[in-house]
Image (tube, helix red, strand yellow):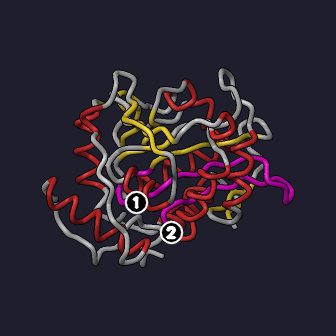
Amino acid sequence: MSDCACCGSDTSLVTGVLSPVDYQAFAQRYGERMFGSNFALTTFPCDQSSSDGLLGYTAELNAALAFSAYVQGVFPWYNEARGEPVLWWSMDPRFVISRESFHVPKRIERLLKKAPFTYTMDTDFDAVVAHCACMNRAGQDGTWLGPALQEVYHTFHARGIAHSVEVWQNGTLVGGLFGELLGHIFCGESMFTLLPNSSKTAFVIFARAFFACGGELIDAQIYTDNIARYGAFSMQRDEFLAHERAGIPRPLGADLRQAFTEVAQSYGKTCV
């Protein structure tokens, strides 16, 4: 596991802003820290995607390959149950929230103050992923979050890359979200809601904590109405990749879990 598991990277790996060549060398070292000396960075041809952002496919999926993808602005998205190969995407433009653009609608601020929930981080990652995989979503046939991809995210979590936020009511898990923390970039994967407003309030607390720690971008990958309300906007892929090269090698400036607790408490919420 990374020595700075809730800061997003290890300060011993790199300092300063890296050139593309040096960034690739950093990504190789970072991968070796996460997966061992046999790790070999797989290079993705991000400038050769189709108009919809599809780069290509592979027959297999593993955590080291997925890690190589994420540090290059690429992510897997496919339907395992339908027998699809592993499809790799790099959207252009990319839908993101920046520290400067982030805002919380007044209605959601009011909901947060009244919400009867307790919040945690990394308390039940497996359950959050399982619930996200089971959620019925409009316009989707089945789930993109199949067993193979779930195993990747479990491995990421074990190595301090992936993190979850849980929402509880009377000891029952009622909402949550998860994603990957890579330096100053958070790659949001999925959220689920069993009670109204549970995941919305969790996202606000998490985002405020992330940006308070110096985080720069929350990557939502593609447009959704839900994320748009928080100030998300479309960023050209070249600009997004430049942000990744600058942001991933640098850890957050403070402990994210501590900041999460402080933000939750500022709303009068219990965070255990």
Q: Is 36 left, or right, of 206 in this rendering?
A: left
In the displayed structure, would residue 167 be above or below residue 111?
A: below
Camera-side residue of 12 and 112: 12
| Amino acid on which the number 2 mark rests in the picture | Gly
Residue under label 1? 213
In the displayed structure, would residue 223 be above or below residue 196?
A: above
Q: Is 228 left, or right, of 70 in this rendering?
A: right
- Disc 2 packing (10 Å; few <14; some 14–19; many ≥20): many
Camera-side residue of 144 and 120: 144
The secondary element bearing badge 1 is classed as: loop
Magenta residues, start to end? 159-186
Question: Where does the image place residue 215, in percent across and percent down from the top left?
Answer: 37, 53
At x 56%, y 65%, the residue is: 155
Q: Is 4 left, or right, of 155 in this rendering?
A: left
Q: Is residue 177 magenta?
A: yes
Residue under label 2? 160
Front label number (1 vs 2): 2
In the displayed structure, would residue 271 be above or below residue 80?
A: below
Distance from the alpha carbon under mark 1 to that under mark 2: 17 Å
Magenta region's main secondary structure? strand
The secondary element bearing badge 2 is classed as: loop
Question: Where does the image place residue 77, in percent across and percent down from the top left?
Answer: 52, 38
Camera-side residue of 37 and 250: 37
